[in-house]
Structures are given as C-alpha cells and as structure tokens.
Image (cartoon, rainbow, N blue to C red):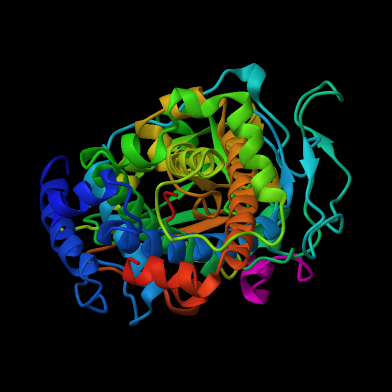
Amino acid sequence: MTDRPLQLSRRALIGGIASSGGLLLSGCSDQQPPTYGNILRMGDNLTYNAQRLLLSRNALVTEYDRSQISSMPAIGTIDPARPDVGLHDPKGGEAYAALRHGDFADWRLKVEGSVNNPRSFSLAELKKMQSRTQITRHTCEQGWTAIAEWTGVPLRSVLAAAGVRPSARFVQFYTFDLMADGIDMVDALHPQTILAYGMNGRELPIGHGAPLRLRIERQMGFKSLKFLRRIVVTDKFDDLGRAGTIQNGWSWYNGI
Amino acid sequence: MTGASEAEANAGSRGHRLWVRLTHWLIAAAVLTLIYSGVTILMAHPRFYWGDVGNDLIQPLFEVPLGPNYHTIRYSAATPFFASPDGPVTADLLMAPWNQNSWARSLHFLAAWCFLAGLFAYLCLAFITGHVRRVLWPRRDELGRQNLWRDVRAHLRLPMPAAEPGPPYAILQKLAYTAVVLVALPLMFLTGITMSPAITANYPILLAIFGGAQSARTIHFFTFAFLAIFLLIHLVMILLTGPLRQVRGMILGK
C-alpha cells in the first residue's frame, strides 16, 4: 500500500498530460476524469495533471495557531433531515433523522470496493483509532475562507484497516444528502486528509457535517464532503452520475 | 529577419513586430475571457477582506454592489464556537445563493493557461530581443517634469493627431505599457495562484508575500480594476488616433 500505487499512477498521469495537453481526447482513459468532449473539462484535466506533475504530492498545507481560529459559516446542506435547504434526499434525510435521534450510536461508516476486508466502523471505533488534530484554512470556491481546528482519523488509516488493494486508484464518498464525490489516491493518502468528528475542540456541529465529514485540505471546501455514510474504493474513475461534480458542470479536481 | 527589424526599430521605424502581434492577441483574448469569468466568480461573493480569512460572518474590508448576492444572504442566529460569546461563531446559511462558479471557474482557469502561455512567451522575447530596454523602459531624461507635462497636455488636446502604429512611444505610453506587462499582468498570475490551496501547500511563501489568501484576493481585484481602466483608456486612444490604421497595424504590422 505504500509505493506501488503511486508509481503506477504517475505513469497514468504522464499519459493524461499527453491527452489533455493536446486537448484532443475525450477522456478515454479510465484513470482520468471524463471530459464528454467539453472544452472546460479538458481545461480541468490540464490543471489536474499539471498540478500532479509539478507539485509535490506530500506538501502539507499551513497549519495555524489556536488563536487564529475564525468564524465559519455552514453552507450547502446544513441538516440532511431538512427538506427546505441544501441538496435534500428524502430517504437519506429520514435515515439521518433516526440516527441523530440516537446520538449517532447506530451510525456506521461502510468501507467497501477495492479492499480486502470490506467493513463498517462505528463512531466509537473511529474515535479509538490514532487521531490527528489540525488547524487549517477552509477555502470555499465562492471566494471566502475560514480557519478551524479539525480532529479525526486519517483517511489512510481507515483505508489501511480495510486492506486497500494495490490496484486502488480512487476513493468515492457517499453522504446522507444528494452529494457524492471522489478523490485520487494522492489526496486520499495525504497525511492531512482526515475523517473529522471534532471541530474546534467539540463534537462536529450538525451544520458542519455531523457525525463525520471529510477534510481534504489541498482542494476547495466543497470537496470536503459532510454527513458521510459510505466510502467506496475503486480501480477506475467513477463520475458518480447525477450525484457527482462533473455531470453538474463542475470540475472534479479543485486544487485551485 | 530579427536583425533587420531590430535595425529598423533602432532607426526609429514604426510598426509592430510579429511576435508582439501574436502575443498581444493571445493575451488580449485570454484577458477578456478572464474578465468575463472573473466578474462572474466575484458575483458569487462580492465581499473583500484582508489577511488569511474572510467570510459572511466576518466584517468585510469593503463590498462591491454587484449581482444578486449583494446584501441578500440570510443566516440563522450565530452560535459561538467557544465559551466566550465574543469569540468566533458559526451560523447556518438559510438559502441557496446565486452561483455560476461551475463553468466560470473552469473557464477562468482554461483562459488562465492561455494567458500564462502568452505572458511567458511575451516576457521571454521582450527581454531576449531587448524590446523592454529599447521600446518600453523610459529613459531618465524622459521622466523630467516638463516632458511628462507636455505629454499629458498632448493627450488632452482634441482632436488628437492620427498616429503611426507601434514604437517609438512617448513617455505616458511607455509608463502605461511597462506597468501593465511588467507589474500588473505578473501580479494577476501571482495573486491568482495564492488563492489555490494546492499551490500554497507547496509554496507557502506566496501567502507570506501577499499577507494571506484574502489579501491576495483583494490585490487580485484591485489589479483587475487597474487593468480594466488601462483597457478602457487603451481603446479610447485607439479610437481617437485612427482606429482602422491602429488595428491594422496590430494585425499586419504596419
């Protein structure tokens, strides 16, 4: 799980540079976000491959001091059970309301797909694992920023516990609202990519994604999905259909 | 070819060289696209801050009265994060704000790649060929108060005499072009990438140089405003000095 996947994906990325550099192919490779012939998506892939090629994979974002923690709005879905704001999913919302009623004691995070031991984690199990606390800047695509302290378990520990296979290339996240999204293994295995259950020294508030949210610090805020319920590891790129970013007109990679 | 045209330029001959014309139009097309997509992005959050952080729950430095989100955003009551009620707070956004950033962001970065290619090619060629030193950089004697004042008055007298396209440039033109190509355009690129969490993870020095991601965003906006004013004056000067001949000069050379 250490070096081999990175080596292989680097080769795939160089192939990707060739294809998006020419702006010719419509994303034939199953290791690249599909472009559907859209020139904006070709530009997105150029940015993705250029950043993967030119930037260090392990560079850490700046971590701040506790005194620098700022106010931070909760936007998008602020409560999956509420039908009036955010991307409400009636079935997911109902399930979420029931779990919250029991203080998330029955909540489980499923981890499946390209792993040797598909399994689920309770909140208590995640909290027993080695935790990481980081004070980082959230950058929203709208233009605003906020600094907060996040406590959680590194995603790579969870993936290792599920026995992620060497063929794994992407990690997809499913939530209690209508959003789903994915990241590549470079971001998934990054030490600052955590599954956070605590914010600013307390339990994660509902508006910020209780009981568990992703923190992926080198991309725009909306990639840090809230209200997680399921993680699926894949060997190929999955655009996640109507729930994903690409078919909604957004870039899949948002490092800028 | 380069040797001949350099000799012509030194002899005071007029006209634009081929590489100047090519990079001019590439950068012009990219900048127009960047302005269009950039204003769309600004409309999602028309508030500006200084430092590392800034959002709807933080007092802005100033706001731009632009678009449907100006003064229309509604939040729930604020909840403090810590025991102190004066400390940082959170609140829930109770609406879906106007947001076209899906295509606007992707278009902005696609145009930014074209802009970067054009600017990089221009600056390399401008320094290698001596274009900066010979055509753009003001000589010391040109910076005298009398010469500056004479050029200002020349720009205020109407009708303006029709001008030959291309260099040599008078002092105000030299100052304007130098400020745009050596300061404003590179500054747009640098403040732009300072807003990227992936790039600043690698180069945190960018955050130190501009004083934070929000400061970089604010400088990005003011530099845009400077470039927009330059563009306006640039177009007016072309209209006043024989537009057909000027545009022809930038396409065909003379």
Camera-side residue: B34 or B105? B34
Whether residue B63 appears in magenta in the rendering, the answer is no
Q: Image height check: is A48 above or below A32?
A: above
Residue A107 in view = yes
User: Is B122 placed left or right of B244 in the picture?
Assistant: left
User: Is B241 placed left or right of B98 in the picture?
Assistant: left
Part of the protein shown in magenta: A82-95
Q: Image height check: is A246 above or below A205?
A: below
The image position of residue B236, as x and y in percent, is: 64, 62
Residue at the far bottom: name it.
A37
Q: Image height check: is B28 above or below B185?
A: below
Residue at image point 81% right, 22% down: B83
Camera-side residue: B165 or A150? B165
Residue at image point 21% right, 54% down: B5
Residue at image point 27% right, 46% down: B11
Residue A193 in view = no
